[in-house]
Image: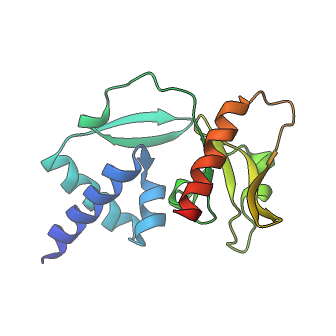
């Protein structure tokens, strides 16, 4: 495989699974230099159009085929430590408020289990075993956050099914 072909494949795999994402995110994830990452993005854009949008001061890339928007239902997920939702991006500010960063990961690369509600990291969770029964203990960063109990129950049941089936 030639270098250009490898760069193209890496860019395709990253942006198809992580968009929207910026140049810094791509270099962080891939380990490429900025020059190599820019070349990979340019190669991707030659084969499949990448649209761009701005978030704060960052240019983000999205494959053109992904630009269709849909109204999504409210969701809540319990994510394990080191899930790609957080670890794949250098800048996590779009999904994690700065004041809560220390509750999602520390400065030494240790990530904690987090709760994601409608795309935002809003708390932590942990597995608790009481009298041989598996339960989930959820702690929200903002105790006043109005999260429907139905969603917490669904996420808990989904996690327990994952562990027991």
41 versus 164 height, above or below: above
> Which x, y percent locates residue 153?
68, 40
* Residue at horizontal 73 percent and vertical 32 percent from the top: 149
Instruction: Answer whether residue 93 is visible to the viewer in this image.
Output: no
- The one nearer the camera, 165 or 63, is 165
Q: Quadrant of the N terminus?
A: bottom left
Furthest toward the top, the residue is: 71
Query: In the image, residue 2 lies at what x, y percent?
Result: 13, 76
Q: Left or right: where does residue 151 sit relative to residue 106?
A: left
Q: Residue furthest front?
A: 131
Please tell me which residue is depicted at 42% across the width and 59% down the height of the picture.
26
Q: Position of residue 157 (x, y in %)?
A: 62, 47
User: Viewed as shown, does residue 129 lie left or right of 25?
Assistant: right
What is the total number of numbered labels drawn onto the structure image?
0
Residue drawn 41% across the image and 33% down it: 53
Instruction: Tell me residue 110's x, y (percent).
Output: 70, 71
Name the residue at 43% across, 72% down. 31
Q: How is the image coloured?
A: rainbow
Q: Residue furthest bottom?
A: 1
The part of the image, by quadrant, that contains residue 80 is bottom right
Confirm whether residue 114 shows in the render.
yes
Q: Is residue 69 above or below residue 163?
A: above
């Amino acid at each position: 495989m030639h270098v250009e072909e490898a760069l193209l494949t890496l860019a395709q795999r990253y942006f198809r699974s992580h968009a929207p994402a910026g140049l810094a995110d791509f270099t962080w994830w891939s380990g490429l230099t900025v020059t190599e990452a820019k070349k990979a993005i340019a190669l991707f854009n030659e084969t499949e159009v990448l649209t761009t949008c701005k978030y704060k001061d960052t240019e983000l890339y999205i494959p053109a085929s992904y630009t269709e928007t849909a109204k999504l239902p409210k969701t809540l997920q319990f994510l394990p430590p080191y899930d790609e939702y957080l670890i794949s991006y250098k800048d996590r500010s779009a999904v994690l408020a700065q004041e809560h960063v220390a509750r999602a990961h520390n400065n030494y690369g240790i990530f904690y289990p987090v709760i994601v509600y409608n795309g935002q990291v809003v708390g932590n969770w942990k597995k608790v075993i009481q009298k041989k029964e598996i339960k989930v203990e959820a702690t929200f960063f903002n105790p006043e956050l109005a999260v429907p109990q139905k969603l917490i129950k669904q996420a808990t049941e989904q996690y327990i099914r994952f562990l027991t089936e």
